[in-house]
Amino acid sequence: MLSMGQTARPAAGSGAVTAALTYLVDTGEKPVNYPSVGGGAESRNTGRYEARDVTIRDGRRRTGGFSLDREGFALVRHQTAVTDFHDDAELSAVYEAEITRLVAAATGASRVVVFDHTRRADAPALRQEMRLREPARIIHNDYTERSAPQRVRDLLPAEAATLLERRFAIVNVWRPILGPVETAPLALCDARSVAPGDLIASERRSKDRVGEIQQATFNSAHRWFYFPNMRTHEALLIKTYDSAEDGPARFTLHTAFDDPTAAADAPPRQSIESRTFAFF
């Protein structure tokens, strides 16, 4: 186990890996995403996709760190008192208060509301046994200009009109359930390297509602990063929407990928991603 006085080992060699990421090919038709249900069939997507080999840099080796308002994501050290991330009652009683404080401190938001938890595993047997979803392996961002405010209306209907009069963001908190993460780590794209035309709205059809996410077409200017061997005392903050249009990163592309440096017998990734509203 990693003690608190250590840091996770960096990727070997140059501090970067080359891996294939799955991009959307823009055919002019709006793609549709049918998300998976824990323990069931994997997600389906209409549309045309292509694998592109890209350089994914080790974010642990970068001087100066990362910022939610600059790159759109940041790695933080974050101890948790949760003992079982598969226990919904413990998430409600313990974890939601922890990440509320974390996101408020990271963003300066006056109010944070936790509204969703998604658990994933990179192994079919684990997914079936524990009713988990698979890692998302198509480049995406969770919300669009339309769907983010709609989520506030859906979940906070009595307050939505007032809340939407001022700035708000959606910040995801991603962390390992078990560490270190060796298979299917997250790659994150520096928001400054993404052009507006790279983002394509995709309809998201779940069993209870129709929403919208963003997918991405290839652009050689994209700058990708990852944080190898993440442990349970670390979390990734990912800004998936910001209503402010005057400078801060607004959307953050991300995807799971196959790390070519992972050992053949590496334990499968298990992770939890929590979504929060941050109201300013």
Image (cartoon, rainbow, N blue to C red):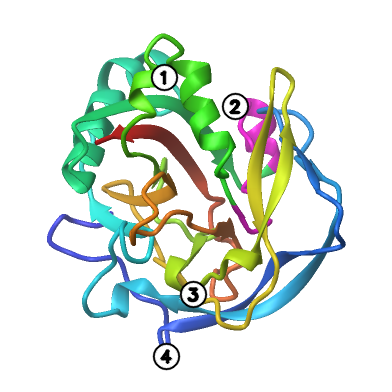
Q: Earlier in the sequence, mark 3 or mark 4?
A: 4
Front-lying residue, 122 or 161: 161
Q: CA distance from mark 1 to mark 4?
A: 48 Å
Q: Position of residue 162 (x, y in %)?
A: 34, 20
- The three-letter amino acid code for the residue at tag 3 is Ser
Residue at the location (40% across, 51% down)?
Answer: 238
Q: Position of residue 260 (x, y in %)?
A: 60, 75
Q: CA distance from mark 3 to mark 4?
A: 22 Å
Numbered disc 2: secondary structure: helix
- The three-letter amino acid code for the residue at tag 1 is Ala
Q: Quadrant of residue 4?
A: bottom left
Q: CA distance from mark 4 to mark 2?
A: 37 Å
74 is higher (above) or lower (below) than 113: below
Query: Of discs 4 and 2, which sits in the foreground?
Result: 4
Q: Earlier in the sequence, mark 1 or mark 3?
A: 1
Q: Is residue 169 magenta?
A: no
CA neighbours of label 1 inside 10 A, class few (<14), some (14 to 19), many (20+): some
Q: Which residues are magenta?
A: 124-140
Numbered disc 3: secondary structure: helix
